Amino acid sequence: MEMFDRKSLVKKVKPKSKILVLPLLVILFVAVVTGFSGNKSRKAAVGRDEVAGVGKSGRHVPAGAVDTLSEEDADATALVDYGYRLITETYAWVGPGTKRQISGNRLACSSCHLDGGTRAFAAPYVGLDKIFPTYIARENKVETLEERINGCFERSLNGRAIAVDDEVMVAMVAYIKHISRELQKDGPFKGRGFVSFKAPDRAADPKNGAAVYEANCAACHGADGKGVKGVAGNREGGYIFPPLWGEDSYNDGAGMNRLITAARFIKGNMPLGVTHESPLLSDDEAYDVAAYINSKLRPVKANKEKDYPDLSKKPKDCPYPPYQDNVTQEQHRIGPFNF
């Protein structure tokens, strides 16, 4: 199984705004001042004041992605650069109030696909062009990469689908192909998807999850889950830390609204600053805090009953009906998943 290395694979896009030295200096300064060492203490997680720097264009440079922006790349094109911006600044290009207005919230694709979709075990984009077309159970058909991206637009971004030949779609696919160009065809690639996770043989406990959230998540995402909005020069119009529930979060048809999916993402990537090799939260803690987050109100996706036409392939943790079994919706939502 091939392992992708983000730093070597993504030789990166040279943005038109020439974001080169300044962000790197800012990150080095932050590293020295904070003394972040990557150890497992809870204080090691990146906090509000440790977010990476801002480029000369005024756009935020995602933590961990500066190396992808500071190297010359003879193959970089305006189209790939546009794709990168769409993924990391979705809200600014196609969010509410923009001319295109494709997404319905002010999240970015990179709110979940971290470091511009290059971080291992954070649902990376690397290699996706080698995998698609592939079968997707939710639609019960073989889908193209473009169709899968539209699924994210409609669910995680609570917006609408676009044509496969739309310039936005073309640019996003171009970026994904660019960062995947050095991988061998057909994979599988270690680092795809999320970290391994064993769901506890019990129902998740949202009350315990609230305590986990307060101790590990609230400092960045807020006690009210509304996140921290961007400011001039730092993700303006979007979020420094995204909301986890409420009207500007992912809708209830998104994959992240499934308990096990959310728990796997949280375990390998949160609090911000941990790595998949050394997760901070246990399986039990990730399980409970995911249940707490997904117990909150969020936008409602229409026509969810049409998902999974073949109900035998519906995931156990899908929180909405119909189901082919006699298990309650509550158990599908929070477990135990021993059925």
Image (cartoon, grey):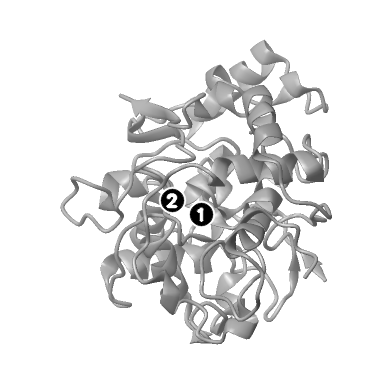
Question: Residue 200: horizontal and vertical position, in percent?
Answer: 82, 52
User: Residue 290, located in which quarter of the rendered image?
Assistant: top right
Residue type (three-letter) at the residue carrying disc 2: Tyr
Q: Which mark is residue 199?
A: none
* Label 2 secondary element: loop
Asked if one can make out residue 290 in the rendered structure from this viewpoint, the answer is yes
Question: Residue 246: horizontal and vertical position, in percent?
Answer: 40, 40
The residue that label 2 is drawn on is 250
Q: Is label 1 or label 2 in front?
A: 2
Is 116 placed above or below 141 here? Answer: above
User: Residue 63, located in which quarter of the rendered image?
Assistant: top right
Judging depth in this view, the residue of 101 and 9 nearest the camera is: 101
Q: Which residue is farthest top?
A: 33
C-alpha distance separating marks 1 and 2: 34 Å
Q: In which quarter of the image is the C terminus?
A: bottom right
Asked if one can make out residue 71 in the rendered structure from this viewpoint, the answer is no
Residue type (three-letter) at the residue carrying disc 1: Asp
Judging depth in this view, the residue of 174 and 271 nearest the camera is: 271
The residue that label 1 is drawn on is 73
Judging depth in this view, the residue of 56 and 219 nearest the camera is: 219
Q: Quadrant of the N terminus?
A: bottom right
Picture residue at 57% right of the left edge, 76% below the top? 323
Q: Which residue is farthest left?
A: 99
